[in-house]
């Protein structure tokens, strides 16, 4: 996970990029749809998944087992 520092700009940090997932979220959206929607905001899928993990731990989203549908808080 990238955090802002004197070497990493805020806009390049994972914490800042989490906003891309929460912006324009759609009800019933799957993880794959969210990844496709935000593909220009993340370097790769691992950075996207790191942001999803943080949002999950913070309680901003949950993912249904099996279907992969995201439930936003």
Image (spheres, rainbow, N blue to C red):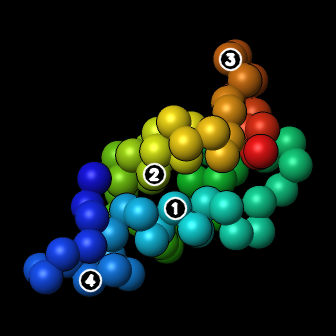
Horizontally, is 5 left or right of 18 in the view?
left
Please tell me which residue lies in front, 39 or 54: 54
- State yes or no: discs 2 and 1 in contact (Cβ < 8 Å): yes
**Image coords of residue 54 (percent x, y):** 46, 45
Mark 4 nearby-residue class (10 Å; few <14, some 14–19, many ≥20): few
Q: Mark 2 falls on what kind of element?
A: helix
Q: Which residue is mark 3?
A: 65
In primary-sequence order, the first of circles 2 and 1 is 1
**Image coords of residue 25 (percent x, y):** 77, 60
Please tell me which residue lies in front, 20 or 37: 20
Q: Mark 3 falls on what kind of element?
A: loop
Mark 1 nearby-residue class (10 Å; few <14, some 14–19, many ≥20): many
Q: CA distance from mark 4 to mark 1?
A: 15 Å
Please give the name of the residue rendered at 57% of the width and 68% of the height, measured from the top-left corner. 19
Q: Which residue is mark 2?
A: 51
Q: Which residue is mark 4?
A: 9
Horizontally, is 72 left or right of 10 in the view?
right
Residue 70 falls in image quadrant: top right
Residue 14 falls in image quadrant: bottom left
Q: Mark 1 falls on what kind of element?
A: helix
Q: Which residue is mark 1?
A: 18
Q: CA distance from mark 4 to mark 3?
A: 35 Å
Q: Nearer the viewer, mark 4 or mark 3?
A: 4
Quadrant holding the C terminus: top right
Horizontally, is 64 left or right of 42 in the view?
right
Q: CA distance from mark 1 to mark 3?
A: 22 Å
The residue lying furthest to the top in this view is 66
Q: CA distance from mark 2 to mark 1?
A: 5 Å
Mark 2 nearby-residue class (10 Å; few <14, some 14–19, many ≥20): many
In primary-sequence order, the first of circles 4 and 1 is 4
In primary-sequence order, the first of circles 2 and 4 is 4
């Amino acid at each position: 996970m990238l955090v802002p520092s004197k070497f990493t700009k805020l806009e390049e940090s994972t914490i800042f990029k989490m906003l891309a997932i929460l912006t324009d979220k759609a009800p019933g959206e799957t993880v794959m749809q969210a990844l496709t929607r935000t593909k220009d905001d993340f370097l790769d899928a691992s950075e996207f998944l790191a942001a999803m993990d943080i949002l999950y731990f913070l309680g901003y989203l949950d993912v249904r087992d099996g279907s992969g549908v995201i439930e936003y808080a």
